[in-house]
Image (cartoon, helix red, strand yellow):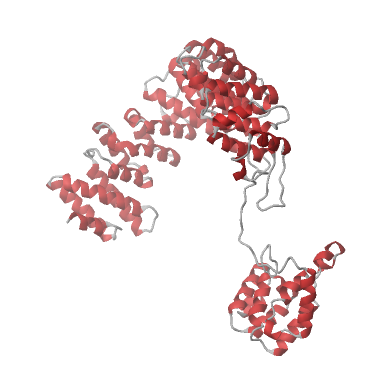
Amino acid sequence: MGLLAASRGTALSFLACRTYTVWNRPDEALAWLMADPEHLHVGWLDSACWASRELIAEATRDCGDDTLVRLVRILLHHFPSWERHPENRYAFGRTQYVLLGAVDERRRSPEVQRRLGELERKFPRTPPVGPRNTEAHLVGPPIVSSAGEHMTDAQWLSALRKHDKEGVDWSGDPPTGGATELASLLESLAKRQPERFVQLGRAFDESIPPPAFGALINGVAGKVDVSNLLDLCTHARRLTGEHAGRAICGAIRITAAQAAAHPAAINLLHSCIDDPHPAFEAARTDSGSGQHYYGGDLLAAGINSTRGEAALALGALLVEADTPVQDLLPLLDRLAQDPIMAVRVCAAEPVTALLRRAPQDALDLAERLFTGVPVDVHDARTTQTLLTRALLHDTKRFAAELIRALEGPEGAARHAGAAWSVLAMQGRLIPCLPPEPDGLTPAARQGAAEMAATDPAHGAQLLRGMFRDGDAAVRRAAARSMRAVASMPPGVANDLIGSFLTSPALAEQPETLARSLSQSTLRLPSRTIEACQALAAISTENSREGRRGHVLVQRYLIETVLRLYRQGDLVTRAQCLDIIDDLYRVDARGLNAALSGER
């Protein structure tokens, strides 16, 4: 304790103070407290000297009289420097009030009692309070949430006009916000009473703050007749201009099946495509924290913009047979050539949808979408899908774009690798493209492995080599194909299992195969016993060396081995018993319970 008491620093002082508080040595505890003025200010962020107060409260019960006299003398003359500043005169004596009030009531001298009386009169409404638990509060609406359900339309209009500014009022607990927070409450109620609130929206005028329009549209979209929804959207667009644009596009996307036949939907999208938002490439702009906005994700940035949302709404409309394609081509052409890449990656979705209905127009749009922009436009699932479909329609026309993406930054190369993998699995590679994964960058090989793993029946030839790839990320991606091994055609499953068992990927990803075999409800592949022997050897080695993950592998392995034992012939049963013996030697968790259930 001597070393701790002599230590300096806020953390060590706190630790010493808390120790002395519970250690039954009151005189020693108060001697430490009085040895340094800083020891009188040990506590928490919202109660800067509360730990010191608790030490005084405990120690003054049984300390010596001389020690108590010394302590009281120090406390009666203790005023921190910040309290002596003229601007803080309202708080002068506050620290003394907190500390002096901790002295045991039975041992307070007349002088202490008199001074405490003075301090109580100065701070009548703020007695000493200890630290509170840390709490987080959402900024709520400027009206009581429960009251919103019972407000009339007139009262809602009045409240929206009254709270038309942004900002936070911190005087309450919890704090309350302004127009946006009230709009959020409006949206939640509109979801529950859509018919009522869509009618209320028709009464909105220029005095209603813009956030209310967008929130109301979000609340009723998909819950009211599409004609009434589009009327509300048109009304909001006329009154708020660009402010409600994203909500309008989102509403059309949600109700595309019903909105496709309504000219008003196309007219609104025509209008929204002229919106200035986004005005800059947010996903390529530093947010001030050293990271790009939206984590650098172009698609996320596009989704959170008006023109990007308009593109996605067009994609939803093009899926519907009633949508007049020719009316949408001019809109798609503008979006495909948008100066902001985040919008282009969203535009890739409707262009992909257009391939089914007007393939030549779609291919022309795809070519324009990929032209004249940085290669990382390919770092999105939407552009990956468009490039893949375009390559399948016309491999020669888009081969150069695939090569550009394959050689691009990591994200673009990974998505392009997936597109290359589709061509490879379908036998559609042409001479100008890399014929084998070895000709790809590590990122592109990873993307190719990820795509092949989603269709191992067709990607088996690629996966066999990727299990042995020199890059760990590629091997890990290829190993995911083992998740579906039990549902593959028997020949493919046995072929892949054999390649996996002899590759470095097995030792790195044993759980993938072990889980798949144990959870299969179909007949297990013939090489399952071989797989179990290899998994047992790996899990036994990992168990002995204390590596993580072996317990889970052993659990799956036990389930599979017992199933094989029940279904197998004499040779298979003998092999299963050998595996069980190996697991028993390393005390595999759950083995005894599983064997008991078999008896």
Q: Residue at x 24, y 32 (%)?
A: 491
Q: Residue at x 68, y 42 (%)?
A: 288
The furthest residue to the left: 570
Q: Can you give x and y, in whole percent of width and height, for residue 505 in the image?
A: 37, 42
Q: Can you give x and y, in whole percent of width and height, for residue 257 in the image?
A: 48, 21
Residue 565 in the figure: left or right of residue 493: left
The furthest residue to the right: 86
Q: Can you give x and y, in whole percent of width and height, for residue 518 in the image?
A: 28, 45
Q: Nearer the viewer, residue 328 or 165?
A: 165
Residue 39 in the figure: left or right of residue 551: right
Is residue 133 placed above or below 516 in the rendered structure? below
How many numbered marks appear?
A: 0
Residue 583 in the figure: left or right of residue 127: left
The furthest residue to the bottom: 65
Q: Can you give x and y, in whole percent of width and height, for residue 551 in the image?
A: 34, 54
Q: Nearer the viewer, residue 319 or 478?
A: 319
Q: What quarter of the picture does the N terminus occupy?
A: bottom right
Q: Does residue 109 show up?
A: yes
Q: Nearer the viewer, residue 409 or 58?
A: 58
Is residue 247 placed above or below 432 in the rendered structure? below
Query: Which quadrant of the figure has residue 426?
Result: top left
Q: Does residue 312 show up?
A: no
Q: What quarter of the picture does the C terminus occupy?
A: bottom left
Query: Which quadrant of the figure has residue 62?
Result: bottom right
Query: Which quadrant of the figure has residue 116?
Result: bottom right
